[in-house]
Amino acid sequence: MKSTLERLVREGVLDRSASLLAVAAADAERGLFLELGFTNVTISNLDTRLTGNEFAPFAWSFQDAQRLDLPDGSFDFVFVSDGLHHCDSPHRALVEMVRVARRGVLVFESRDNALMRLATRLGLSPDYELEAVVDEGFDFGGVNNTGTPNYIYRWTEREFEKTVRSFLPHGNPGFRYFYGLNLPYQVAAMERSPWKLRVLRAADLGLRAFTTLFPKQCNSFAMVALKPRVPEDLWPWLEESGTGIRFRREYAESRYRTEEG
């Protein structure tokens, strides 16, 4: 995650003074953005135990990622790390992130692929995230930050793009992807039986070599969507008008039979 954000800063996609909303976030995100030198960050989550002072010098806001109580385009970027799969509607949360972002969204989540499906079938990776609820004292950490363990929704690039494009039909968004292997040593260490930990250690080097050759078989990835600029990125069948964006009549008339001719 850190290396991806650093790369986006180097490439000029992201700047450290940009306003950034981190949803479903906590201490890890605070530490990350402090380390990277970001200065205008708002941490948000559904944790009723917090007052907000915990994330100083950054601001805190009590927000449901699926129903952000914020105007359109409130922040330059909206960020989430392993938070969408804690929502009972991950796609709705993604759409809310896109709505509130002026420039784009940065999403770090689990990836759905053949290797992950095999690991799930073998019992090496769970479908439901029990460990997070155990770690939070059985009352938090699950779906919508309740005590009910959440299903781990794993994404693909195609799902991400279809969701974003459905919400932004007026132009062509920009998409970037970055892949990483994140072996669950901490989760495996929580279990009484040591077999998962032993398997992970034995397979570590082989998995890293395999995913270097086939990066889309990594279990984690970053999905970046940059919102279309208006009017530069409008589809050719659309144009700006005094009331917003409209269908270009001449475009339609040049391609289709219309009632006018």
Image: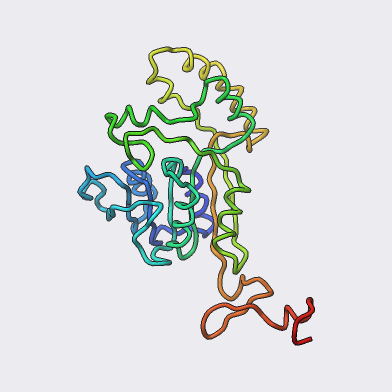
Residue 3 locus on image (x, y percent): 49, 44
Q: Residue at x 37, y 46 (%)?
A: 24
**In front here: 161 or 105?**
161
Q: Residue at x 37, y 54 (%)?
A: 38
Quadrant housing residue 26: top left
Quadrant housing residue 133: top left
**In front here: 197 or 3?**
197
Give left or right: position of 256 versus 80.
right
Give left or right: position of 45 versus 12.
left
Q: Residue at x 68, y 75 (%)?
A: 237
Residue 106 locus on image (x, y percent): 48, 52
**In front here: 79 or 24?**
24
Q: Residue at x 56, y 38 (%)?
A: 111
Give left or right: position of 60 versus 2.
left
Residue 242 locus on image (x, y percent): 53, 86
Whether 28 is drawn above or below 93: the answer is above
Which color mode does the image show? Answer: rainbow
**In front here: 117 or 143?**
143
Residue 39 locus on image (x, y percent): 34, 57
Q: Quadrant of the C terminus?
A: bottom right
